[in-house]
């Protein structure tokens, strides 16, 4: 195993331009004040982590706390998801995702997310574009995108006296 060391300087012809125009990375703590679990209905919550309003990207953890369902929706962007805990499947596919399994969803796909696991499921998702949601009869309910997620997060913070964490907004 390599000895731990701290890089203090490396050759970098772009150091000045990076310092001037770049953005530093960060580590956000998993606390309620920094990354709160925002209720999503009675049986689920979303931990918002990133909003990119230029590319319509958003990252979060979806936690469905018991067996349940996210209604039928159609994607107009790409979704990359990692199952952290529990399990989930889709009514339209024949696979079940468990911890460590990686899910991709692509523009044009329409499906219905279900968890049968007694503890539900936790999914980290990095998503792009909008998704249309429908009721059981195929009637359009709403279209969600990065601004839906920002509203969900900021309204919860403002209602509960929590600071809006500006670090979630990618510059
Ligand atoms: Fe989906």
Image (cartoon, rainbow, N blue to C red):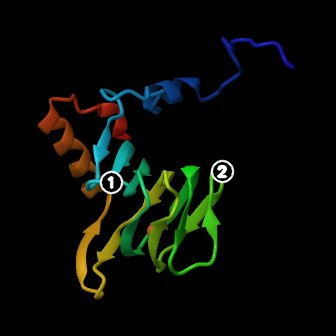
Q: Is residue 38 above or below residue 22?
A: below
Give the residue at the far bottom of this rendering: 137
Residue occupied by mark 2: 100
- Ligand 1 is within 8 Å of the C-beta of the residue at disc 2: no
Query: SS for tag 2?
Result: loop
- The image quarter containing residue 170 is top left
Q: Is residue 101 above or below residue 21?
A: below
Q: Position of residue 146 (x, y in %)?
A: 32, 56
Report if the CB atoms under discs 2 and 1 are less than 8 Å apart: no
Residue occupied by mark 1: 43
Q: Going 55% across and 52% down the picture, which residue do you hit?
A: 86
- The image quarter containing residue 1 is top right
Q: Is residue 37 above or below residue 101?
A: above
Residue nearest the viewer, comparing 23 with 102: 102
Q: Does any portion of residue 59 appear in the rendered image?
A: no
Q: Going 20% across and 36% down the picture, which residue do you hit?
A: 157
Q: CA distance from mark 2 to mark 1?
A: 23 Å
Q: Position of residue 91 (x, y in %)?
A: 50, 78
Q: Position of residue 153 (x, y in %)?
A: 25, 44
Residue nearest the viewer, comparing 82 with 13: 82
Could you classify mark 1 by the number of other residues whose Cα lies within 10 Å: few (under 14), some (14-19), or many (20 or more)? Answer: some
Marking on residue 171: none
Specify which label sits upstream in the sequence, 2 or 1.
Answer: 1
Q: Quadrant of ligand 1?
A: bottom left
Query: SS for tag 1?
Result: loop
Residue 8 placement, left or right of 135? right
Name the front one of labels 2 and 1.
1
């Amino acid at each position: 195993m390599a000895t731990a060391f701290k890089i203090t300087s490396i050759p970098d012809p772009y150091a000045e331009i990076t310092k001037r125009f770049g953005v530093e990375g960060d580590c956000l703590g998993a606390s309620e004040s920094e990354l709160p679990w925002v209720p999503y209905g009675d049986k689920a919550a979303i931990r918002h982590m990133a909003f990119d309003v230029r590319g319509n990207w958003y990252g979060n953890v979806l936690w469905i706390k018991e067996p349940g369902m996210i209604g039928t929706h159609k994607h107009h962007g790409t979704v990359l998801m990692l199952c952290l805990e529990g399990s989930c499947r889709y009514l339209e596919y024949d696979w079940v995702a468990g911890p460590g399994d990686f899910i991709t969803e692509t523009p044009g796909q329409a499906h219905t997310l279900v968890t049968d696991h007694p503890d539900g499921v936790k999914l980290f998702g990095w998503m792009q574009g909008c998704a249309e949601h429908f009721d059981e009869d195929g009637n359009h309910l709403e279209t969600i995108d990065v601004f839906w997620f920002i509203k969900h997060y900021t309204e919860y913070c403002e209602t509960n006296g929590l600071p809006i964490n500006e670090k979630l907004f990618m510059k």
